[in-house]
Amino acid sequence: MEFMKILDGARFTQVGFVVNDIEETIKKYAIILDCVAPAAVPCGEYEITQTKVYGQPSPEANSVLAFFNLSEGVQLELIQPNEVPSVWRDHLNQYGEGIHHIAFTVDSIDDTIEKCLKMGMILEQEGNYGDGGGKYAYLNAQEDLKCRIELLENFK
């Protein structure tokens, strides 16, 4: 299966960065983007997110998030993880601050995950949005894309 066939019909949505200090980073991006600084918000409670890291429930894995709307349907996401193992924390510890993922909105996250797994990607973390309005999954594409792929499915 060709790499592009995996994301057939997907919509590029986001670039995500992991950071050590989200408040300072928000200020700097607000200046360079010449916009109002968004609020940093908690990722969500485990009762809703049901976060799994490497297939195992991880109720303590969490982060603080901020979203800059760059253009219609495209965001810059900042992520400050807590100290508990997660793909956010692992990335920050291994690579430092910087790009963590590129995200695509898909119609069926489960079908797209299956295609990614067949291509040799590894499902590292998954869960629900903090507000329960959708699902996310991080797949390791480090070898090919030098970052992770995040898949997003919004519930209608």
Image (cartoon, grey):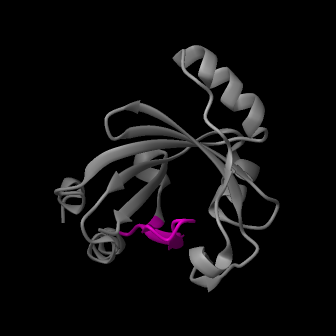
Magenta extent: 120-137
Image coords of residue 140 (percent x, y): 48, 61
| Camera-nearest residue between 125 and 155 | 155
Residue 39 drawn at (x, y percent): 65, 39
Please tell me whether residue 11 is drawn above or below residue 7 in the rendered image: above
Dominant SS of magenta comes to strand
Side of 106 relative to 134 (left or right): left
Q: Quadrant of residue 56?
A: bottom right
Residue 79: in sight, yes or no? yes
Front-most of residues 142 and 85: 85
**131 up-or-down from 64: above or below:** below
Image coords of residue 145 (percent x, y): 42, 46
Quadrant of the image containing the N terminus: bottom left
**Furthest residue toward right:** 83
Whether residue 50 can be seen here: no
- Does residue 131 show up magenta in the picture? yes
| Number of marks present in the image shown | 0
User: In the visual, does 119 lie left or right of 87?
Assistant: left
Tell me: 21 left or right of 117. right
User: Could you tell me residue 68's position as x and y percent?
Assistant: 51, 34
The residue located at (61%, 35%) in the rendering is: 38
Image quadrant in which you'd find residue 57: bottom right
Q: Residue at x 70, y 57 (%)?
A: 63
Q: What's the residue at 51%, 71% (across, down)?
A: 128
Q: Is residue 151 magenta?
A: no
